[in-house]
Amino acid sequence: MDLGLTPEQIKSRKRFSDFVDEYIAPVADQNDRDEETPVELIKKLGEQGFLGAFIPEEYGGKGMDMVTAGLLCEEIGRGSASLLSLLTINGMVSQAILKWGTRAQKEHWLPGLATAEKVAAFGVTEPDIGSDAKSVETTAELSGNSYILNGRKKWISYGQVADLFLILAQCDGKPTTFLIERDTPGFSTTPITGLLGFRSAMLAEVQIEGCRVPEENLVGRPGFGFSHVTNVALDHGRYCVGWGCLGLAEACLQASLSYTSERKQFGTNLRGHQLIQEMIADMITNIKATRLLCYHAAYLKETGDPGMIMETSIMKYFASRMVNKIANDAVQIHGAHGCGSEYSVQRYLRDAKIMEIIEGSNQMQQIIIAKSGYMNFRLEKRKK
Ligand SMILES: Cc1cc2nc3c(=O)[nH]c(=O)nc-3n(C[C@H](O)[C@H](O)[C@H](O)COP(=O)(O)OP(=O)(O)OC[C@H]3O[C@@H](n4cnc5c(N)ncnc54)[C@H](O)[C@@H]3O)c2cc1C
């Protein structure tokens, strides 16, 4: 496994980084305050091909390799965690279609999703169902050549503006996924505001009242909705979030390096105090450790290794914990300034917390990781 970047990957990273510095980082705090992502910014991401990073070229995407796409998530995460979630969610729906959709669905939807002509949202969570996603209460009933869907979804990122929703419902008691377009009669969204973090990710609650969805919009087979379609999407989501946490942590580190070099207390820069150095040293070390986990997950995905799903869970779990510690220390280092709106570190901390909840909470990751540990332990014993 080669841990060095190719010249092409270094070039791509520079391009991503320049884009973030010019178009994302300078407006991220304002977007956070406005609780909005301007449409022009979404279009810009589309023009750059960033929303098609994981979509193959034959469907209008960029078909980036896993490291390059990871570097993109890292850079976007450095600029704005809310915007990273656009990349994540759009990618989750695209991957679900790519893996489980029909040829017609791929040809119809993927080119638009790759260029931001269409924005996708992922609709699993409901007011009463979160982690136990296979038990969603939204229903789908076959009626002639269509399905009639009824239910509610909550906390849907970019639900306020998305054109296409991947919805998990129960069809005859079997979890099943459907694509629903915003303009379907009976479909409506209500904005969710005042969130702790991801404030510009334009979350919405979704009402689905007697929506008639053509049979062709079924993704995968009835009964595949959770075990196959949603899980592919969540694995992809964790990959993007893990890399995004790395970027967010780097933003915290940069802010802390800069602040401690300027701010003076007790006659010296903060950087001269050893307890501050301890926090900086831990930040650097944790960022390096996370980067290795990200590269490893990328390598396994690139080579199609069966261990890639577990490694991605481990990487997302570690990265989201790490960024919470780092963002917390970044605010600590900034003192009262870290709590005010003049510095971005308060946004970083609020966004970091969300990373431990989305795409399967950290408790869900712990359960998955521990289960696999016991399985492998049994295998090891059997070998002896
Ligand atoms: C900003 C944001 C954006 C989101 N975007 C989307 C989106 O686009 N699409 C979407 O479908 N959802 C989205 N979500 C919802 C998210 O996926 C859920 O919040 C998450 O799955 C957890 O579900 P829950 O909040 O209902 O918590 P619950 O499942 O009710 O869990 C509450 C707490 O109990 C813990 N817990 C639950 N079960 C167990 C157990 N068996 N053992 C130990 N601990 C347990 C959980 O880890 C959590 O800490 C978003 C959430 C946020 C905050």
Image (tube, rainbow, N blue to C red):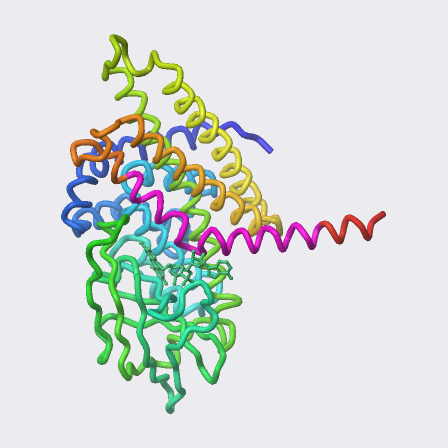
| Magenta-drawn stretch contains 75 | no
What residue do we see at 28% from left, 47% from top? 83
Residue 96 sits in which quadrant?
bottom left
- Between 77 and 44, the residue placed more toward the observer is 77
Instruction: Give the residue at x 41% y 47%.
Output: 240
350, 20: nearer the viewer: 350
Q: Name the quadrant of the N terminus.
A: top right
Decide whether residue 354 is among the magenta residues: yes
Residue 365 x, y percent position in the rendering: 51, 52
Looking at the picture, how far across and down is residue 123, in whole percent? Answer: 35, 66
Quadrant hosting residue 15: top left
Magenta range is 348-376
- Tell me if 340 is positioned left or right of 261 in this view: left
Q: Position of residue 17 (x, y in %)?
A: 31, 32
Where in the figure is residue 167, as x and y percent of width and height? 37, 70
Note whether 272 is above or below 61 in the view shown.
Answer: above
Position of residue 159 relative to residue 56, above or below, is below
- The residue under the point 35% across, 69% down is 126
In this view, the residue in front, 206 or 109, is 206
Residue at 57% across / 44% down in the picture? 300
Q: Which of 61/301 is in front?
A: 301
In this rendering, position of residue 342 left or right of residue 177? left
Quadrant in the rendering for residue 171:
bottom left
Image region (quadrant) for ligand 1? bottom left
Q: Residue furthest top?
A: 267
